[in-house]
Image: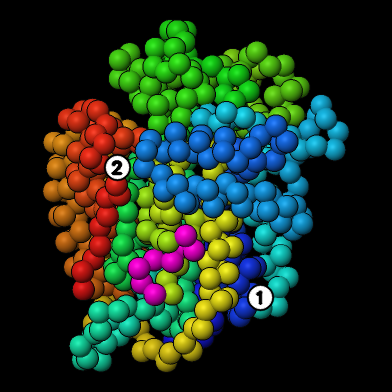
């Protein structure tokens, strides 16, 4: 078992983790770990772009108001102001780092700006329809070249080490104050659990879309950081607000493929299976309504008609323009035999983004000292009850910068010597089917009972099943040797439990949380729902 000491331990290598690493390396050594290949993350699959006030006809207040409206009254205005106003500096820094945003076809020298649902102006900078991948490329190259950043792949973080936990291990009475000291990490290549000692820990582990049966997220999105933070005593907020992207491709050979909101921004229209355009029945903003409204509209139409999918029509644009504007989507569709210049695209909603997460201040710090959360694993207050399209990559960069600045200005205690991982009497498992079976069961009942439209009865049914599974997995966890699949399943169960718990707390419908038992919004519920593990 290895002992690794670093100033800043960053768990997760998407845009948030990479950006923080680059900024924090000015102040100390950074160790960036990821449980997959370097750069594999939700960030890599972000298509649409990054929102920022860039055009001279746009303004900060407009972006602020669009964000507040989409957030359905639950945004933290200070977080919105900070993110929007620091946005242009993020774009300039991305360009300096070599990010190749798409140039305007009509205005040489200018950048192409998309408009997406909920935005009152064109302010989405993009790299064709592979913005996340391009940002990950540029940031990844900069991280690899930096002498103070160490990168370790195939490292699965198991649990955080805190001062309260350590005091108990030593037989001491823990103080009320809690501070993060490091983490236990499974090195999958060596099949050993290493001990990381750090002056500060930053969670940049992304969301938890894999808790649902249908999702746009990659396999790594299992809510690891949120679950670890909860077990360490961090406050977690607003987990009921799960954003379902309205338009995921519906095709037997298309796994988790997103049809970007930018298509609707360029005039795409939604139809049911009978060829009827239905968004006029739901919202005056039509296809450009915020995502929660469009997703619920599609869900309602599918339930009404009994059909499997809706259809997005882009046939108003010529083939060459679609290929130029959306090369990735166009190529993927054609590989499946779909020509979107001639036929409508079959689409369904899918779990996409968690607006809840580890509750932080305006510098990304949780209530556990020196434990920071940035990107989708955090709840900064920016998104409120519903994230405005393309604000996520912006938030990741802004709060990664602010976290690095806060830590750079702080006198941190030296990294402590920490005890090795204790496997106890755990043995190798001969029942791995338990993991795969339980994983599928969670994802299916979360989709059926805790999806786009909820009821109190369905939520309670899900809660009862989760409690049974949690107890089963807890016993399994301590009896058998650690594997990455077991770690992810344990985290997935905890995330599912928090989603249901927060959903049961909120006795109203707001933003992404819609329940038939309380179909209206209630001003008494304009506050966060929070859960916290008590030591």
Question: Is 77 rendered above or below residue 319?
Answer: below
- Quarter of the image for residue 390 reads top right
Quadrant location, the N terminus: bottom left
Q: Secondary structure at mark 2?
A: loop
Q: Main secondary structure of the magenta part?
A: loop
Residue 43 covered by magenta stretch: no
Question: Is 198 rendered above or below residue 501?
Answer: below
Q: x, y (%) of residue 223?
A: 38, 56
Q: x, y (%) of residue 275?
A: 47, 8
- Identified at 76% across, 38% down, the residue is 111
Quadrant location, the C terminus: bottom left
Question: Is 345 rendered above or below residue 529?
Answer: above
Residue of label 1: 26
**Left or right position of 155 against 116:** left
Residue of label 2: 526
Highlighted range, magenta: 362-369
- Quarter of the image for residue 185 reads bottom left
């Amino acid at each position: 078992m290895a002992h690794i000491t670093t100033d800043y331990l960053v768990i997760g290598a998407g845009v948030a983790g990479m950006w923080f690493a680059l900024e924090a390396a000015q102040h100390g050594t950074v160790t960036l770990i990821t449980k997959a290949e370097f750069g594999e993350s939700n960030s890599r699959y972000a298509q649409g772009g990054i929102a920022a006030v860039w055009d001279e006809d746009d303004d900060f207040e407009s972006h602020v108001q669009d964000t507040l409206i989409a957030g359905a009254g639950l945004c933290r205005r200070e977080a919105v102001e900070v993110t929007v106003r620091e946005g242009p500096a993020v774009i300039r820094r991305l360009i300096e780092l070599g990010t190749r945003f798409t140039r305007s076809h009509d205005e040489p020298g200018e950048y192409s700006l998309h408009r997406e649902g909920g935005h009152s102006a064109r302010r989405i900078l993009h790299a064709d329809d592979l913005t996340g991948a391009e940002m990950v490329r540029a940031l990844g190259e900069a991280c690899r070249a930096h002498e103070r950043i160490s990168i370790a792949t195939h490292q699965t973080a198991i649990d955080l080490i805190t001062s309260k936990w350590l005091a108990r291990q030593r037989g001491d009475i823990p103080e009320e104050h809690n501070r993060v000291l490091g983490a236990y990490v499974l090195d999958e290549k060596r099949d050993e659990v290493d001990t990381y000692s750090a002056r500060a820990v930053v969670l940049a582990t992304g969301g938890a879309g894999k808790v649902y049966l249908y999702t746009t997220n990659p396999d790594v999105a299992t809510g690891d950081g949120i679950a670890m933070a909860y077990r360490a005593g961090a406050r977690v907020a607003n987990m009921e607000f799960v954003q379902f992207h309205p338009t995921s491709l519906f095709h037997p050979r298309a796994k988790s493929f997103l049809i970007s909101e930018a298509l609707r921004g360029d005039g795409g229209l939604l139809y049911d299976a009978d060829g009827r355009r239905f968004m006029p029945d739901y919202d005056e903003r039509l296809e450009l309504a915020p995502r929660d409204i469009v997703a619920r509209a599609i869900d309602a139409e599918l339930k009404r008609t009994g059909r499997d999918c809706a259809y997005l029509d882009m046939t108003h644009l010529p083939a060459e323009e679609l290929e130029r504007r959306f090369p990735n989507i166009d190529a993927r569709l054609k590989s499946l035999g779909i020509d979107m210049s001639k036929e409508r695209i079959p689409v369904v909603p899918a779990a996409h983004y968690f607006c809840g997460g580890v509750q932080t201040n305006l510098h990304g710090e949780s209530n556990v000292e020196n434990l920071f959360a940035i990107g989708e694993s955090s709840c900064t207050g920016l998104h409120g009850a519903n994230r405005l399209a393309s604000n996520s990559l912006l938030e990741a960069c802004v709060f990664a910068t602010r976290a690095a600045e806060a830590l750079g200005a702080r006198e941190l205690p030296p990294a402590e010597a920490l005890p090795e991982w204790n496997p106890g009497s755990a043995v190798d498992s001969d029942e791995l089917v338990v993991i795969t079976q339980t994983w599928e069961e969670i994802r299916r009942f979360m989709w059926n009972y805790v999806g786009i439209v909820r009821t109190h009865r369905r939520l309670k049914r899900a809660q009862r099943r989760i409690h049974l599974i949690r107890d089963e997995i807890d016993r399994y966890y301590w009896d058998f040797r650690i594997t990455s699949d077991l770690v992810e399943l344990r985290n997935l169960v905890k995330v599912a439990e928090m989603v249901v718990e927060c959903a049961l707390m909120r006795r109203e419908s707001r933003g992404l949380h819609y329940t038939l038992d309380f179909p209206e919004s209630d001003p008494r519920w304009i506050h966060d729902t929070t859960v916290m593990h008590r030591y």
